[in-house]
Amino acid sequence: MNQATLKRIGLGGITGNPIAFAVVLGLMALLLAIPLTHNGYIEVVFRNILMYAAMAYGWNLIGGYTGYVSFGNVAFFGIGAYCSAVLATHGVDNVLLYVLLAMAVCAAFAAVVGFPVLRLKGHYFGIATLGVALAVADIIANLDVLGGTGGLALHQVDEAHFSLYYYAMWLVTLGSMLGTFFIARSKLGYAFVAIRENEDAAAVLGISATRYKIVAWAISAMMAGAAGAVFAPANGFIDPSITFAIDSNVFPIVMTILGGIGTVAGPFIGALLLAGANELLQRFFVKAHTLFFGAMIVLIVLLLPRGLVWLFGLRGGVRAWLKSLAVYKA
Amino acid sequence: MHLIAQDLVNGILAGGILAVVALGFSLVWGIMNIINLAHGAFIMLGAYTTYQLFTAFHVDPFLSLPVSFVLLFALGYLIQRFIMNWVARAPVLTTFLLTFGLALLIVNIALNVWTGDTRGVTTAYSGANFTLGDVTVPWTKLFTLVAALAITGVMHLWLTRSKTGRAIRATSMDIGAAQLSGVRVTEIYAIVFGLGAGLAGVAGTLISLSYALNPTMGDLFLIKAFVVCVLGGLGSVQGALVGGLVYGIVEAFATQIDVTIGGQHISGSGLQDAIALVVLLIVLIVRPTGIMGKATA
Amino acid sequence: MKLRVTAALGALALCASLAAPSAPVSAAGDVIVFGSPVSLTGNLTKEGHLTQEGYDLWKNYVNAHGGIKVAGKSYKVEIKYYDDESKNDTSAQLAERLIDQDHVNFLLGPYGSGTSFTVAQIAERKKIPMVEGNGAAEKIFNQGFKYTFGVLSPAKRYLEGILEMARAQKPAAQTVAITAASDAFSQEVAAGAAAYATSHGMKVVYSNKYPDTATDVSSIISALKQTNPDVILNAGHLQDALLVQKGLKEQNVLAKAYGYSVGPDTPDFANALGKDANGVFGGAQWSDAVKYRGAPGFYTSAREYAKAIDSTYHHRADYHNAESTAACLAFQYAIEQAGSLDPAKVRDALAKLDVTTFYGILKFDNRGLNVYKPMVVNQIQNGRLTTVWPQFTADGKPKYPTLAWGQR
Amino acid sequence: MSDVALRISNVGMRFGGLWALNEVSFDVERGAVLGLIGPNGSGKTTLMNVISGVYKPTAGEVTYGGKRIADVPTHAVCHLGIARTFQIVKPFASLSVRENVAVGAMYGRYGAKRSTRESFERAQELLDVVGLARVAERPASDLTIPDRKRLEVAKALALDPDVLLLDEVMAGLNATEVDEALDLLRSVNARGVTLIVVEHLMKAIVSISTTIVVLAEGRKIAQGAPADVLGSPQVIEAYLGSRWVKRQEQLAVIEAERIEAKRLQPPEAGA
């Protein structure tokens, strides 16, 4: 089995394996029923899963589809959250407005910053985005109007509105998922993938790499920003250490890769599994859960180097799978 | 005037450590294309090695440098050989994910071994200093800088002169060609990863002299390593040094900025990360491969 | 195909087990269950453990002495812990779980101001009282929360005592330099100290902040050194306290007093610095030297409490221990006074609480904050933590001015 | 004759101290098939890169319909009607063969007018034309070398070009495949597409080109009809080296001697 054949395994086209996508859509439909449990805990757990999934979709678009590995998407999550907080402190109490403003601001910010930053390639792009994220966090932490490190308190969440944020987050995630699906299948998606595969060859085919990279990053920013915009009022309080947390930066990347990079199902599957497993481990191993969490990631990477979506495309049972693993060994 | 000189000295002294912090990270990234998120954990292990030797056997921290290098080299070598190698041909980000998991594992094992207590390595000469005109220079940090320079120099010589060093550089330029000329890439990779870990261990030892230890200390240095190695130029020994010094000096001078604009008090010190990062962005935009990086066509 | 089915089943099992309650904590009706998300891993592990020790010591005492009496009936106490890794979204999730899944009666606070704030909101929404002893940022108490109570003195008071002490010495301190980490708690501490100094005729000659991720503060120390202050204060956490103290020695900065908001009270501080820790002052919520006479139902004096901590956990009682235990005590007395486990009634009892304990007075203002208890000032003297201020509770005299480096 | 599609005037391209191209000038007429030949390193691929806008020339200019190509960004060059293939093929490895071609149809000259679906239909047509329909669904990274060359041509054709630059699309093909490729190019040319062909296979070049331009060490050394150009000793020397010329001369002498000997031999009786 050669590298080329391996690449085909589990790929199933630009949107990834269709069965995996169908399963994910089904799961999304099920998640709509979560608030019916009237269990705040379950709701918060899944709201956080959805939040991470939306951020993972954002990252997947620029990192997975366009091949520009961003280490700074948390900036958009944070900016989105602050958009909500600023509106809330000015008396606006409307999640839709929060999300719209966050998406607009994030897209604009991504476009402005993207112009110089997206000229950089590969690792240098990655670091530049990390720089942008840390700098944005630092600047907000030093701005008194935004509460500095003290943060901003939004209005108190009451029981009646509690599920509202769940549904809002669900919609943001569904939007990111379907957005990814339709973008991937559209001309835009093919431009992104062409840039990922070979920027020079893409240019010769008439694709303006600069333009489409910025478009990809702006859409990516909108997804993360929308998640942030719902997170802020749901959490009721934000500060730079919450909204620009390292985890919020790394987790979506980890989830996407674990689920299946450059697929529509991957980010969701990754988020569900990672956040779900983390929650369970935390419950059963109050102290050692992070240890097991680390071990779990290592094992999954070693057993499924191309992500969980790969499972859906594997044919020929355990033996074929083991055989295909050997190909990744140096 | 005296503050400017003092800041320059502070910056250079801090930059020397950052250079070593970034060196191993930069080599692994530049040569193997692996973003090693476990680098911070390796730094922490190096610091604890020094701590253990110091508290149990009163070994001077500087004397423990070779020990932490060797121990961490061995650890890195084994990890690459028996874990990372398993997915060596998978896409780049797969190994990135793997190092994320490894970092979690190592840090949490350390939490169980050493607990979350904060510890320090305080030697008899810790804090001793001398003055040059108005400028105060702490001996420990000066020695640290000297050690950092020496390590960078040795690394540079080894990479350019030794047979293995050349094989490493050949591999980083063209794996296929290197393989054809008889380089065992698996072995080279294990050595490079070991080297990266060993240098992280050395950095940890040097850090333990000025910074208190706890199992999660590595993360802060990991982020700095990211910035420094790109600032200087990925995979370049001199780049790490230049990047470290630039970063240290920028941070030192950023501290003294202090202005008030429209009622908003801006402390450069509070913004020192942001300032350093803006410098990074400017450098990258002017020179997309870092200060010492090779310009590519 | 088989693989996929296995995977799908695995995923299903995972979802299902999320919904299931964990170990049945409140089997019978004669147990009061408290819940607390604390930092058991992550960068606040140490503080999280101290918090947990404080809670557990109280639980063991109460259970060994017949439990809490509510309307004539004795209840045993149980505490359900989860690890919030000091992360905000995690502690929110855990607080919800404790309430909805584990059905705890009451919440004990997490460690840290940010997480306390998050959990406070959930307590408010669910109308479950929370008493916390480890989130001193005043912001938490300015939101109008009715179900959150803090047993500790607010952040702005942390360094006031040191300034008060330094002003009372001869020669009296005139000038002060303040360095502070950028996090919310430290900023409140610094602002409080600066306000106190200015309003009491002292001059703040230097004030600056550094990122709470700083690994080198030497340039701040260089700038501070130029202003030649009488008192050097640092508002931060253990790691930066060590960094600052080392840096001060490295640059040979001489002041009459060195004070830290957090650091000197943890044994780690003196262990890490050795002799260089001598002479350092630390603001503390409590020390084992305080001379309060506590109400019955628990150790009545600080000495007894310290002895219990030492024999159980084999280290000197830390104020994180004490304030955590105090949070439990607030519940104990409030529940007894309410004579009920009804959350609303216990809340009202907490609001009216006025009791003295080994830790000091437990009484809350209308925001839920314990503003009635003074802070203490400790000084490390010959490697030992000695309480030196306020005078009525001190077990030693402040050594002032602090000796030059190398003579300590 | 005045219908010039592409004008290359005094183009020079310097890399560091080396002039890869030096004062190269020639016109390409609309509808022509121009063969561009020269030894390795003579600057053929560099010239292709200049024409397709990948490199900006150090000196001189390339104009297409009176418009300077150096001012047009790479991605917009194809919108003018110029398409190219790469000597080292650059397929989008994880995309299928059809998708590879469809990307060209989407973003090429008439891409804006095509829906995604129409682009795929166009791609399928082109795959039929180049003979890749049988592997349309396979990932491009699976293709054999000859198929990759075909894919390059199909991608370029998907851009609906007026001028098509072909960089060694026949290298590595066997005799039958070369003939197929030539037929393909002829049919493309017959539809009015101007071709610029870089090729090592002399036979192929000669059979298809209307004009041949010869480059050596970055300079143009000859231009003209295939037969004329290939006959020129200067070209032969530059292209094949002086030893080859010498050997040809020796061969010519031997041949002349052989013929002479044959003439002198008396005819056999009864033959």
Image (tube, grey):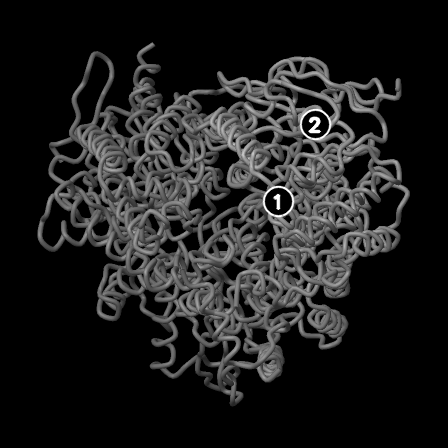
User: Which quarter of the rendering shows the N terminus of chain B?
Assistant: top left
User: Vertical placement of A93 versus A271: above or below?
Assistant: above
Residue A63 appears in the figure? yes
- Locate residue B237 relative to residue A137 in the image: left or right: left
- Report crowding for label 1: few under 14, some 14 to 19, many 20 or more residues within 10 A (C-alpha): some
Q: Are marks 1 and 2 on the same chain?
A: yes
Residue C356 appears in the figure? no
- Report crowding for label 2: few under 14, some 14 to 19, many 20 or more residues within 10 A (C-alpha): many
- Locate residue A280 relative to residue D176 in the image: left or right: left
Residue A288 in the image: x percent, y percent? Answer: 39, 70
For disc 2, the marked residue is: D53
> Separation of disc 1 and disc 2 at Cα?
24 Å
Number of the front mark, 1 or 2? 1
The label on residue B78 is none
Q: Chain of mark 1?
A: D
Depth check: B282 or A39 in front?
Answer: B282
Depth check: A68 or A206 in front?
Answer: A206
Sequence-first tag of 1 and 2? 2
- Amino acid type, label 2: Gly
Residue C170 in the image: x percent, y percent? Answer: 23, 26
Residue A66 in the image: x percent, y percent? Answer: 65, 47
Image quarter for residue B171? top left
Q: Residue at x 16, y 22 (%)?
A: B130
Depth check: C363 or A63 in front?
Answer: A63
- Amino acid type, label 1: Ala
Mark 2 falls on what kind of element?
A: loop
Q: Residue at x 73, y 65 (%)?
A: A159
The label on residue D171 is 1
Image quarter for residue D233? top right
Q: Residue at x 18, y 31 (%)?
A: B143
Residue D161 in the image: x percent, y percent? Answer: 82, 36
